[in-house]
Each structure stands twice: as structure tokens, then as C-alpha cells.
Image: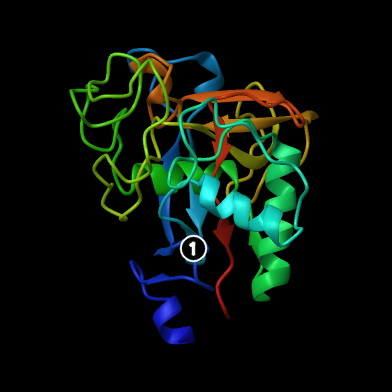
């Protein structure tokens, strides 16, 4: 099992109904966006090299309402977020803050004995890019039917979340890294990448009352669902386009 866990692309679940995890290989990438990328914000720079020294696992999908509700049933949290009338089940959980996400990963860790956590911002972008360098993992324009966002095509964009996994995966096998819901990551907010860690670790200095979100959402325009786009809010802020996905360390 340990050997399989460390194989890039391998998948596992630590229990029935828990998040399906995908092993992401170690590697290097350039984080941030070039100055000439359409839709770029200054907070996406300066671009810098990041080395991910060890493989790690990340959820194939954002955490769903079904998974969140299992946490509630198991008394991992007593918070039951509203689904806006869109339905629960395999839709990504929304109306959760960073602090709520931390309660979920603590519950997962207790249930499974594995160190579940939120991904760092660098790990998140590395996983979202999956070896690509452009604005989107499929190309330079948002296209149609590739992502759940405003003007992105499909049945949900600009209206509501889509059930997870309805849009094409990237080459790491991850769905909905872009669009559907903004995803909380571990890092404190910093306006620029000056002084950012180069090893993939979370940046735990800066404005730690605010935490980073990545990926854009169902109600955002294409420029905000680029792989480099960034957002932030207070740790306890909840919104109907805020969700998260989990990461986990692998056995040594």
C-alpha cells in the first residue's frame, strides 16, 4: 500500500464516502502569471520557482455536501451549511469558511490516522497546472463547456454550482480545480509573492487574519478562473461560492 501510495496518479480512499485522493508527483514549476497574461492581477507576481520535493495527495474533487454531512453526523462539527436550494449530495460544499475547513480536516485525520490538511497555495497551483504553463490547463482561452464559471458554457455557469466531476479533469486526474467553487488553502494572505516559500510549504506570515482562496467559481468571469488567479477573505467568512479540497501527506 505504501508503495502504491507514492506512485504518481495512484488513487485511494481512507474509508467509504471519504474523499478520493490522487497522488501528485514531486516536481518543479513557475508559480504566478507572466506580465502579459490577459486578466492578470499584480498580486500574481513576481513569478518564482517552486520545488515540490515530495509527492503528496490531493482530493480528486472539492469536498462535497455528502462528505461534509458525514462529518456532521460523526460530530466532527455541528455546523450544517446551507445549500442555497441547489441540492446536497455530490455538489461541492459551500458557505464554509477557512475555520470550518480546518474542522473538517481535523475530523478526517482523527477518523483515518492520516495527516489530512488543506493544501498550501503553492501545492494548489502546482496541482491545478498539472504541468501546463498557460492560463487554463486546457489552453489559453476559457472555451465552452470546460469549466463552471460565468460565460463558461454548460448548464450552471453564472447560476449555481455543478455536481463535482462534470467537467474534464487535468492531466493529474483532478476535476474542478478551476471554477465551480473558490477553494480555501492554508496560507496567510500576502499581496505579492516577494519572500514567498520556494519549497511548496504554506506561507504562514503576513495577514493571517485573512486566508487565500484559489480557483474561481461558478459566478466569476473567465479571468478569475485562471490557474494563477488569487482571492482572500477573513478566516470565518462564508459565501455561496466558497468551498475547499483536502490534501494529505503520504507515508514515508
Horizontal arrangement in the rendering, residue 225 relative to residue 45 (left or right): left
In depth, the one of 199 and 152 nearer the eye is 152
Relative height, residue 131 to residue 5 (above, below) = above
In depth, the one of 72 and 19 nearer the eye is 72
Q: Quadrant of the N terminus?
A: bottom left
Structural crowding at the residue carrying mark 1, measured as other residues with C-alpha within 10 Å and reported as few (<14), some (14–19) or many (≥20): many
- Give the secondary structure at mark 1: strand
Colouring rule applied to residues? rainbow
In depth, the one of 195 and 86 nearer the eye is 86
The residue at which mark 1 appears reads as 57
Can residue 2 be seen in the rendering of this structure? yes
Residue ID at (50%, 41%): 88
Position in image of residue 48 (x %, y %): 50, 37
Horizontal arrangement in the rendering, residue 60 relative to residue 122 (left or right): left
Residue ID at (57%, 33%): 94
Relative height, residue 101 to residue 178 (above, below) = below
Residue ID at (74%, 42%): 79
Relative height, residue 193 to residue 98 (above, below) = above
Position in image of residue 239 (x %, y %): 62, 23
Q: Hey, which quadrant is residue 224 in on the image?
A: top left
In depth, the one of 1 and 136 nearer the eye is 1
Q: Hey, which quadrant is residue 24 in on the image?
A: bottom left
Position in image of residue 135 (x %, y %): 32, 27
Q: Residue furthest right?
A: 209
Horizontal arrangement in the rendering, residue 8 relative to residue 198 (left or right): left
Can residue 63 be seen in the rendering of this structure? no
Position in image of residue 127 (x %, y %): 42, 49
Amino acid at each position: 500500500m505504501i508503495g502504491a501510495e507514492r506512485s504518481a496518479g495512484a488513487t485511494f480512499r481512507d474509508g467509504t464516502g471519504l474523499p478520493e485522493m490522487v497522488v501528485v508527483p514531486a516536481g518543479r514549476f513557475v508559480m504566478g502569471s507572466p506580465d502579459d497574461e490577459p486578466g492578470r492581477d499584480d498580486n500574481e507576481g513576481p513569478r518564482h520557482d517552486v520545488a515540490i520535493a515530495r509527492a503528496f495527495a490531493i482530493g480528486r474533487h472539492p469536498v462535497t455536501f455528502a462528505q461534509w454531512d458525514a462529518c456532521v453526523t460523526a460530530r466532527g462539527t455541528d455546523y450544517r451549511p446551507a445549500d442555497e436550494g441547489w441540492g446536497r449530495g455530490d455538489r461541492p460544499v459551500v458557505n464554509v469558511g477557512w475555520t470550518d475547513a480546518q474542522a473538517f480536516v481535523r475530523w478526517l485525520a482523527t477518523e483515518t490516522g492520516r495527516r489530512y490538511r488543506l493544501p498550501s497555495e503553492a501545492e494548489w497551483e502546482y496541482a491545478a497546472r498539472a504541468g501546463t504553463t498557460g492560463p487554463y490547463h486546457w489552453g489559453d482561452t476559457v472555451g465552452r463547456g470546460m469549466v463552471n464559471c460565468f460565460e463558461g458554457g454548460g448548464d450552471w455557469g453564472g447560476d449555481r454550482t455543478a455536481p463535482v466531476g462534470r467537467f474534464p479533469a487535468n492531466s493529474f486526474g483532478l476535476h474542478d480545480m478551476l471554477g465551480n467553487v473558490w477553494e480555501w488553502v492554508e496560507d496567510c494572505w500576502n499581496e505579492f509573492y516577494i519572500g514567498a516559500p520556494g519549497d511548496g510549504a504554506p506561507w504562514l506570515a503576513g495577514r493571517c487574519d485573512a486566508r487565500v482562496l484559489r480557483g474561481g467559481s461558478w459566478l466569476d468571469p473567465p479571468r478569475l478562473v485562471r490557474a494563477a488567479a488569487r482571492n482572500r477573505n477573513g478566516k470565518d467568512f462564508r459565501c455561496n461560492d466558497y468551498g475547499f479540497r483536502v490534501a494529505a501527506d503520504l507515508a514515508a
